[in-house]
Image: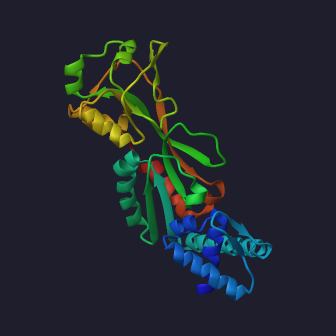
């Protein structure tokens, strides 16, 4: 069994091309990863990796050994999935990624309910707004909000959320109401840098469109930070409706230009096509699809 663990560690090192990344995915110390690979090489009786301070190269023997490890790991996952299907009780670890906003507000509470149904699953939830490499990070399912780039991943849209222009009552009182989109070019804008075009916005009214270019002295890559700055009265910005719906209802934020429409954003479940055969991933995707209700 210990040898199988070392094979898994070696497999991750080669797959990710880094001792550091393998250690992060496996949640162990980098020194432990290096030690297990060295022990494995001694057991095999051959060098599997050529290490330098800058590069990590797989030897010919290492490549053959890696391919063997890959087959064993895939067979093990398949066997585990087959057993789970027969028992209708998924087991193992499920690594989920989501943006900070939807992860905190919706996915984390839903995970609590999901684990009550399937207590044998171990959940590892990663929250960050930046799009991450699912293969390198070992992510099974990602819940993404926004506009997706083309990739070899499967993206299933499960919901949409309209974009809303808001500011605090304090800001509106200080700088006056916004009557037309063109007036936004004179206002202080809080720029959310992860958007495709964070300083260019198109408003639609009665099939007529108007594009404005905005400026601001505050920029952030975190949607929650945008909301905090809005509440503090530091400017105007656009966020998904589900993020600000309660604040609008409670009067902490005011929707501006409500008679104009902005684009909606999609909410997607993203996964590798071959991964969807696993029962735990199928069940989680179905559960989120059926239970995620955005404001």
The image shows residue 213, relative to residue 227, as above or below, that is above
Left or right: 32 as drawn, with respect to 240:
right
The reply to whether residue 271 is in sight is yes
The one nearer the camera, 151 or 39, is 39
Image mark count: 0
The one nearer the camera, 288 or 231, is 231
Left or right: 10 as drawn, with respect to 263:
right
Residue in the picture at 68% in, 73% down: 75
The one nearer the camera, 285 or 190, is 190
In the picture, the quarter occupied by the N terminus is bottom right
Left or right: 246 as drawn, with respect to 207:
left
The image shows residue 282, relative to residue 153, as above or below, that is below
What is the image's colouring?
Answer: rainbow
The image shows residue 252, relative to residue 182, as above or below, that is below
Residue in the picture at 54% in, 51% down: 132
Which percent across, then down, holds residue 220? 39, 38
The one nearer the camera, 145 or 217, is 217
Q: Quadrant of residue 19?
A: bottom right
Left or right: 174 as drawn, with respect to 26:
left
| Residue extending furthest toward the front | 53
The reply to whether residue 89 is in sight is no
Which percent across, then down, holds residue 187? 33, 20
Which percent across, then down, holds residue 117? 41, 65
| Residue extending furthest toward the right | 60
Q: Quadrant of residue 70?
A: bottom right
Which percent across, then down, holds residue 250? 20, 34
In the picture, the quarter occupied by the C terminus is top left
């Amino acid at each position: 069994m210990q040898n199988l663990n070392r094979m898994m560690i070696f497999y991750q090192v080669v797959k990710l091309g880094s001792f550091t990344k393998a250690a992060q995915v496996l949640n162990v110390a980098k020194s432990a990863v290096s030690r297990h690979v060295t022990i494995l090489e001694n057991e095999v009786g051959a060098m599997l990796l050529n290490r330098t301070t800058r590069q990590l190269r797989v030897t010919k023997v290492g490549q053959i050994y890696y391919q063997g490890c890959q087959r064993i790991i895939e067979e093990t996952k398949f066997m585990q999935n087959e057993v789970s299907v027969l028992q209708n009780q998924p087991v193992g670890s499920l690594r989920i990624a989501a943006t900070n906003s939807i992860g905190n507000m919706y996915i984390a509470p839903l995970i609590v309910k999901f684990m009550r149904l399937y207590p044998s699953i171990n959940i590892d939830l990663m929250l960050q707004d930046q799009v991450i490499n699912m293969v390198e990070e070992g992510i099974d399912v990602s819940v993404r909000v926004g506009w997706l780039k083309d990739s070899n991943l499967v993206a299933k849209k499960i919901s949409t959320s309209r974009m809303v222009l808001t500011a605090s009552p304090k800001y509106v009182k200080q700088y006056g109401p916004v009557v037309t989109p063109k007036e936004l070019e004179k206002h202080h804008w809080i720029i959310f840098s992860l958007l495709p075009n964070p300083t260019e916005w198109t408003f639609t009214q009665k099939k007529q469109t108007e594009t404005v270019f905005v400026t601001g002295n505050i920029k952030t890559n975190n949607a929650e930070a945008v909301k905090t700055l809005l509440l503090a009265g530091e400017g105007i910005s656009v966020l998904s409706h589900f993020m600000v719906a309660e604040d609008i209802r409670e009067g902490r934020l005011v929707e501006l230009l409500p008679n104009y429409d902005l684009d909606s954003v999609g909410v997607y479940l993203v996964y590798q096509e071959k991964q969807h055969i696993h029962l735990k991933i199928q069940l989680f995707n179905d559960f989120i699809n059926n239970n995620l209700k955005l404001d």
